[in-house]
Image (cartoon, grey):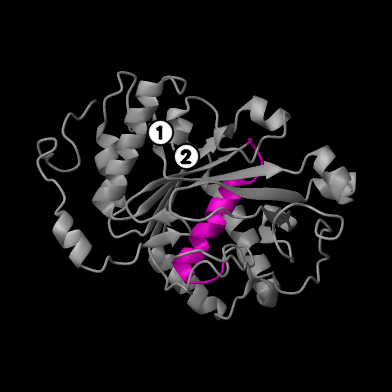
Amino acid sequence: MSETATLSKPKPAFSDPLDVHALLTTPPAPLDHVLPGLLAGTVGMLAGPGGAGKTMLELQLAIAMATGTPACAGLFAGLLPTSKPAPVVLVAAEESKAVLAHRLHAIAHTLFERREQFGIKLAFEDFLARLQNNLRLFAGTTQSYALLDADQQRTRVLKDLAKACEGARLVLIDPLRQFHDCDENDSAAMNKLVQALRSLAEHVGAAVLFAHHASKAATFSGQGDAAGAARGSSALTDGVRWQLNLSRLSRDQAQHAGVSEEARGQVLLLDVAKANYLPPQPTIRLQRLAGGVLAVIEGVGGALTQTRAKVPSAAAPRARQLKLAGAHV
């Protein structure tokens, strides 16, 4: 069933030009970064191959924001001030309630077993209370989550999602393929999908981040850090304002860095592949811990070297702080 109405009544096109005099005579308000480079009211993408850890990363980001704690043992440290707990919505359309329960237990166990490494200062009871108040977690169901139907028309699900996201600061949907019935290689359809997500972000006042698969070509050619790594139409990358790429360490990268084949599967690379409101960032290296929980590997990010690529032991000290000059956040 299609909904021809938008989330709010649209104005006529080009009816509201900016007041340039007011813009230049009034100090601009600071940009509202929900994540570094991802502003409130905008749309971003998390791209990566299947099984790399996108859902776990999203869940850890959601938990961090909902509880006001560091993400992944120092991810984006130094780029954002300490944040207050904020409402987060995560729709994991391909995960069951049982699987999400296991993931939550794995994360909570790791956070509190390694409190110093992950920067956890809360008592578990306070942590749980903040999660209960701020994390709206939705599992996959037999019901369609499609925001666009096969005719590229918006469905009532978009309004349902907007209602579920009221007051949220961050909205995560995973994976994008479950949120439309269109051909992902059709640039017109993907442009309309990004526009629908943008209208959601603007209506709610949140940042919207969707997970999407990387293409096989990008994965096999070692181009997982590139903005063009996402599968399907380039309209997806063109339409978002921010793109985060999660990729596995290739054999060549591991060999160059002195990482053993056994340890290679524990290391993931995280790249800000596109950021309209953030200077270029170095590659961040993540370690996959027990239960798939992700933690920033200690040391400065960037190109892998013999000394920087070592996987830390279970007793690793607290994660490194990113020092990125010129980041205005």
Which kind of residue does numbered mark 2 sit on? Ala
Residue 70 numbered tag: none
Where on the picture, by quarter, is residue 148? top left
Q: Badge 1, how many Cα within 10 Å: few under 14, some, many 20+? A: many
State yes or no: residue 277 in magenta: no
Query: Contact, CB < 8 Å: mark 1 with mark 2?
Result: yes
Q: Residue visible at 42% across and 71% down? A: 85
Secondary structure under tag 2 reads loop
Total marks in image: 2
**Most common SS among magenta residues:** helix
Vertically, is 35 above or below 276?
below
Distance from disc 1 to disc 2, alpha carbons, whole Å, reads 8 Å
Residue that mark 1 sits on:
179
Spot occupied by residue 168 in the image (x, y as percentages of width and height): 34, 58
Where on the picture, by quarter, is residue 298? bottom right
Spot occupied by residue 167 in the image (x, y as percentages of width and height): 29, 60
State yes or no: residue 55 in magenta: yes
Left or right of 293? Residue 165 is left
Q: Which residues are magenta?
A: 49-70
Residue that mark 2 sits on:
93
Spot occupied by residue 192 in the image (x, y as percentages of width and height): 32, 29
Any part of residue 266 in sight: yes
Q: Residue visible at 85% across and 50% down? A: 257
Q: Badge 2, how many Cα within 10 Å: few under 14, some, many 20+? A: many
Given residues 79 and 207, the one toward you in this image is: 79
Which kind of residue does numbered mark 1 sit on? Phe
Q: Residue visible at 43% across and 66% down? A: 132
